[in-house]
Amino acid sequence: MLALVIALGIVLIRYYEPLTAIVPAALFVLLYLLFRDPHRAGASVALGVFSPVDGEVVETGRTEQGDTGAAALRILIRINSLGTYTARSPIEGIIRNPGKKALWVQSDEGADVLLKFSGYRLGLPPRAFAQFGERLGQGQRCAYLRLARTAEVQIPVDGKVLVEPGQIVVAGIDQIGSVPAPK
């Protein structure tokens, strides 16, 4: 896709006015921002929950009816519009439900963590790369966000939230919480 935009810009510069290449140049920058996916090598932390997206924490709290059916701690992150649009797995574990609006990951210790997206621009829901039963590592790419506005992470109620509203987080690098140790 990017190569086509570059080719269009070259054709416009060569055969038309150089100023006509401004539109393909702007389109190239926009597409680059949307589709870039830098390599991130975060530290592996036992029982750690990492940020799935680049953005700002806007809310933390408890919900009595989480999407997995149990009470949960929730962390709401506003996705950075100029950040990457690739979601990363918050924990290491097995995919239990790769839905269009949420991704349910269960750790080896049995802790259920749900990653949920909302506020779709242009009506395009995120698309999961991961399939049911697939094993993901902490920070591993798992979905393409398609211009979603917010990401919500739900962790077990006896886990810990390690971030506060207003804090900036980087996907796959910053730890935002932890799941409880097995009993």
Image (cartoon, rainbow, N blue to C red):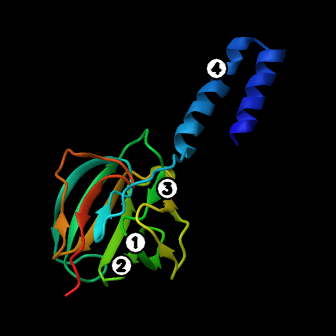
Q: Position of residue 91 (x, y in %)?
A: 36, 69
Q: Quadrant of residue 115?
A: bottom left
Between the C-alphas of marks 4 and 2, the distance is 49 Å
Residues under numbered marks 2 and 1 in contact, where contact means CB atoms less than 8 Å apart: yes
- Residue 129 x/y as whole percent: 56, 66
State the mark number for residue 129. none
Nearer to us of marks 2 and 3 is 2
Asked if labels 2 and 4 touch by Cβ distance under 8 angstroms, the answer is no
The residue beneath circle 2 is 107
Task: Looking at the picture, tell me which residue is in the foreground, 57 or 111.
Answer: 111
Q: Is residue 77 above or below residue 177?
A: above
Mark 4 to mark 1: distance in Å?
A: 44 Å
Secondary element at image label 3: helix
Q: Residue at x 44, y 60 (%)?
A: 88
Q: Which residue is denoted by mark 3 in the rendering?
A: 123
Q: Residue at x 28, y 71 (%)?
A: 47
- Of badges 3 and 1, the one in the foreground is 1
The CA span between labels 3 and 1 is 30 Å
Q: Sequence order check: which comes first, mark 3 or mark 1?
A: 1
Q: Which residue is mark 4?
A: 22
In the drawing, does residue 117 fall left or right of residue 177? right
Nearest to the observer: residue 64 or residue 122: 64
Going from the N terminus, do you reach mark 3 or mark 4 first? 4
Which tag, 2 or 1, sits closer to the chain's start?
A: 1
What mark, if any, has residue 92 been given in the picture?
1
Q: Which amino acid type is shown beneath numbered disc 2?
A: Ser
